[in-house]
Image (spheres, helix red, strand yellow):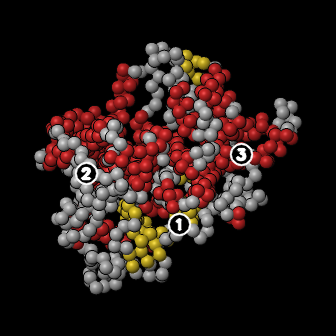
Amino acid sequence: MGRVQFAVSLLLASPPLASAFSARPKPFSSATCSSRGPSRVRTPPPSRAAVRSAADASPTAEAPPALVPLGGAPGKHASKSGAPGKRSPQQAKRVVERFKEYAPIREMGFNRSNLISFFSKKPQVVAVRLAVVTRTLNLVKKEWEAQEGLPRHERTRGAILREELSGLGPCFVKIGQTLSQRPDIVGEEAAEELKSLQTENEPFADDVAMEILASELGWTAGPVAPGVAPHSGCEDPAGPTLFKAMSLKPIASASLGQVYKAELWDGRSAAVKVQRPEAVRQVALDWTCCALGLEALEFYWRTFRPSGFENSLGDIADEIATGVFQELNYLEEAKNSEAFVESLSFLGFVDAPSVVGALTTPCVLTTEWVNGRHLKDLSRDEGLALTTMAVEACTASLVLTGLVHADPHEGNLMLDDASGRIVFLDFGLMSGVAPAIMEAFARGIQACLAEDYDSLAVVFQDVGFVDKPLQWRQDESQAFAERDLSVFSAELRAAMENDPDGTSRFGALATVLSSLGKQWRMYTPPYVLLLIRTFLTLEGIAGQVDPKFNIYEVSLPWALKRSLSPSSEEGQKALRSALLTPSNQLQFDRLAKLLADVAPPAAADPNKQMKPDQAPPPPPPAGGGPQGNP
């Protein structure tokens, strides 16, 4: 079935969609949520119930699992906090088996045509999901506006926003996590509430988690751990256990899974992450909804606003989906973790939990326990050290190794209590960067700090943000015409100098580019989206520790190191022009400045700082990072 037929089938499946939109939900009450934190037993908003009822009215409709607590209704089988209640192991098994038909999606990874084909057979599922998302976001918007005039202490809208995004599933939690680091975009109130999405998502039922754990690791001899109820495949409830000990409740709950603390039989402490049973379904379904929505928007723009529209919104959605789908396979995450630490070993201060390979599968990830603290538990000096190391590590990844952690929010960064190193967590979402792009970003960092907007304009062309030659128009009613690069660089200079944070904040540069895009034909290359997420997130963290933190200054030494070892023809030309005169005479003053700027940056522990005679790894081969694009 093609996309047009799929769209038609969606319209034919519209009765539940229409009834969902026609239902009149009751307004939220302050009892629904608490601004102090996530409630442990939450009553779904009437809107969700209306949509679910509409879906259930059709014998072929499938109610979205995110709307049906996996632990059962409170007081029946289990609470949403995961209390085991009266459910039998066989009932827990049936919950897991409900999503087995989606397992092949994890195995094949992201594939646009396969996903469209898969969900074309389930048009009502897509229709219901679209209704759920639309109504939920509309209700949050209305409630937010309705509480605008209330005193801050009486508002519950932040908690409502947090809980509704959490209820919508992994994709929306990822959005909330990113926005939680950007109070400059969503405001302090929303950002503060959304921070809990980094570590405090609503958990799923513990008996379901134990069922997944035992099934994935093939354990049948006895329970998973002492004190844990037997799973469906348990041969002897009094038999040997897989783990020596395990927490009965998750210590953290994220968008795709939750973590238990365990003790291995060799005495090591471990963190055991178990994937939510509905995770694959939810991610795949949300991508399908997003892709269909973006294609409709793209069709509208190309039909009614054809002048200047060049971006493929579908390609952008695909690029993000490729990264998110990687998170669904914990074996890939384990490989990414080891590769990331190895690629940055020359820094001397980057670490990650060691993977316990024998207890790791696509749905279960077991790592050694790390005693460390997150940013919220650190002193200001410790927080500054953590932030500086995070920026240095991510910049070195961007311009030297090509393997970038694309999800460095607060919940994924820790300061190791024993070593003082930074510990990165959660390596599901990674970015691979080709050598030519690494060198272009390195030149861009230098140009921003030097306020060299002619060079910065060239960088924008090299990375694909603007055309070669440049295209400009006065307004949307006119066609584009070629314009000289010097004109663009002059407008870029004026816009950057007009922004007080132009040479210190990455977000300011993004704002400037957005404003220039009204007249200059500009693009958003799909590969750059996750990189933008990385540095916007880091910048948000840095702003909490030090409002004057300059991300470019911290990044500069690594950008210069990259510039001194170019592998592309453009990079080699840039280095020659920086060090040699047109007559090939060495410019000793520039060389001295470069050597001074490229001195090793301060690390959190002087004993672990990179030594001056340590060289960064050689540039990776063309086509991606040391392991290729992850």
**Residue 398 spot, x, y in % from top left:** 60, 48
Q: Is residue 396 visible?
A: yes
Q: Earlier in the sequence, mark 1 or mark 2?
A: 2
Mark 1 residue element: strand
Residue 413 badge:
none
Please give the name of the residue rendered at 27% of the width and 77% of the height, measured from the top-left corner.
230
Tell me the kind of residue under disc 1.
Gly
Residue under the point 43% across and 33% down: 312
- What quarter of the picture does the N terminus occupy? top left
Of marks 3 and 2, which one's residue comes earlier in the chain? 2
Marks 1 and 2, Cα distance to the nearest angstrom?
34 Å
Height in image: 333 above or below 309?
Answer: below
Q: Nearer the viewer, mark 3 or mark 2?
A: 2
Q: Position of residue 583 (x, y in %)?
A: 86, 31
For the residue labelled by badge 3, is the local secondary structure a helix, a strand or a loop? helix
Q: In front: 162, or 171?
A: 162
**Mark found first going from the N terminus, 1 or 3:** 1
Along the line of sight, which residue is nearer the eye, 153 or 364? 153
Between disc 1 and disc 2, the foreground one is 2
Q: Which mark is in front, 1 or 3?
A: 1
Do the CB atoms of the residues marked 3 and 2 lie less than 8 Å apart? no
* Image disc number at residue 32: 2
Vertical order, 578 against 485 (above or below): below
Neighbour tally class for label 2: few under 14, some 14-19, many 20 plus, Cα within 10 Å: some
In terms of depth relative to the viewer, which is nearer, 216 or 258? 258
Residue at label 3? 560
Task: Using a 10 Å C-alpha cutoff, classify the residue at mark 3 as few (fewer than 14 neighbours), some (14 to 19) or many (20 or more).
Answer: many
Give the amino acid at mark 2.
Thr
Q: Position of residue 443 (x, y in %)?
A: 67, 39
Q: Is residue 551 above or below residue 373?
A: above
